[in-house]
Amino acid sequence: METLERLLLTADSTEVNATTVHNRRRVTAMEQAMNNGHWEVVHMLWAHPSVADDSRDKVAHDTIFPIYNASAVVLEDNPGHSFTWAAFVHPDLPVADDVSKVAVVAAMLNHPSLHAVPRADVVRRLMTSTDQDDRAAIDMADKLVREYLTSQQYFLTRYELVDGPPVHVSATAVVLLAIDHGIFDQVFDEYAGDDGCLDLNGFNSCNITLGRVHADSRGHKTDDQDWQAEFDVWDKDNDESMSKAEFHRYCDQTFGNKLKVVLKFMKSDLDCARERSHRSRLDTAFILGLLPPPEYDAADIATLRLPHHPNVNMAEYANLVVMPAADRSLEDIFLKERPSEAQVIDMIKQVAAALDHLHSHRIVHGDLKKLNVLRMGVHLKLIDLDASTRIGDALGAKFSSGILPPELVPTDVNQDVTADYIDAAATWTDAKLHMRIHSQVPNEFAQNLLKQLLLVDPTARVSAAEVLAHPFLT
């Protein structure tokens, strides 16, 4: 390099712009250096005032990258700049201290000429663009550029939608499964102290937000020593605080390095507000809590497309709530597992405890069914509070088999009561119900509990708190 530098100091315009034949084409020293990725040589040539090259001011500008031209909705390579995109994102290419490669990429993606092309398509092409050795640009990109480009494929730059059909599609809501790539940083930043670290209380708050609690089968919180023990394990330097790096290692071990979540898009503003309001006052030991989403607006949701439901207009579902994804619903457990009697009793306890918690806050669920009870780890939690209401208020139009005993009322595929059977339910008597209970339930304690739950007069039925104290569950 020192020899080259001395030669350049004495070279005139003719010498620095001289050409040679390479692959049957005449190239300058500048072109040859750029093609071979010799960026130190490129910078030395740029320093010579007589070098005839118009790219010195464009190395951080989209015109020298293999940008894709938007013609209608077709993306085409710009062959005049082959491989310069891969060279730009490579860590070995230096840029000025006041230039951010991520900012350059962002400006390029936001360029008006690309507005007619789906952003995800542009990003995909950039990531898979190759260098002269057929290596994908994303595999060689520096860490920050790689993270930025990857995030641009996600909904709200954070949610990686899981392939396959939606979890649920109805006239009122659409539910999608996703991987959340940003939640751990978000909760850490929310609860970190002024020193940028978590103390024990902040660590506990992060776990509660992420839907992880220490609780027994009735949802009662266990001793704080459980959290202290976990905190101590991951506080590697024993300074009674947890850095972001330590918290990330904890999350990697506990949740995997990404958290699977459910995105629930709701049509009704009122239902969404009700769900958020009621959940905010309830304990996540009993009710599946909500996760904080990034900022969004209706236009962001309107851009979503459902490949399995092309006729669904997501602009109509402009309200979003985010929850941790569950292991399995009680419906799946009922259909696909064979729990023992002891496990069944424990599940009944957990559901009764969750209902007792709701009722103690004078809230009626209003849509209780097996699909709305989810298992998180070893705990069952209630979901779907958009139909919930305060005791004494009108229940609302949404209903399911939970309003009448699901064992006795035929329902449709969504466990919703069909109108034809509502009149039939009015003909029941306590005697008829008792006969059916005796014919189908062998356990005498279980029979007694069901008789107290399935009385025709709703005011005579036992409360959730009384269910928990019943001999069948104790």
Image (cartoon, grey):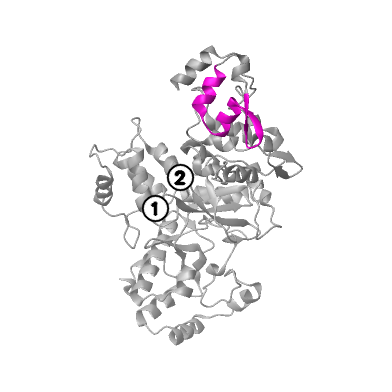
In the rendered image, residue 353, in percent from the top left (x then y), is placed at: 38, 62
Could you tell me the amino acid type at mark 1? Phe
Q: In which quadrant of the rendered image does the C terminus lie?
A: bottom left
Q: Nearer the viewer, residue 443 or 177?
A: 177
Residue at numbered disc 1: 255
Could you tell me the amino acid type at mark 2? Ile
Q: In the image, what residue occupies the spot 50% across and 52% down? A: 179
In the rendered image, residue 264, in percent from the top left (x then y), is placed at: 56, 53
Q: Is residue 467 magenta?
A: no
Q: Secondary structure at mark 1?
A: helix
Q: What is the magenta range?
A: 19-47
Q: Secondary structure at mark 2?
A: helix
Total residue callouts: 2
- Placement of 380 over or under 426, stated as above or below: above
Residue at numbered disc 2: 183
- Placement of 132 over or under 456, stated as above or below: above
Q: In which quadrant of the rendered image does the N terminus lie?
A: top left
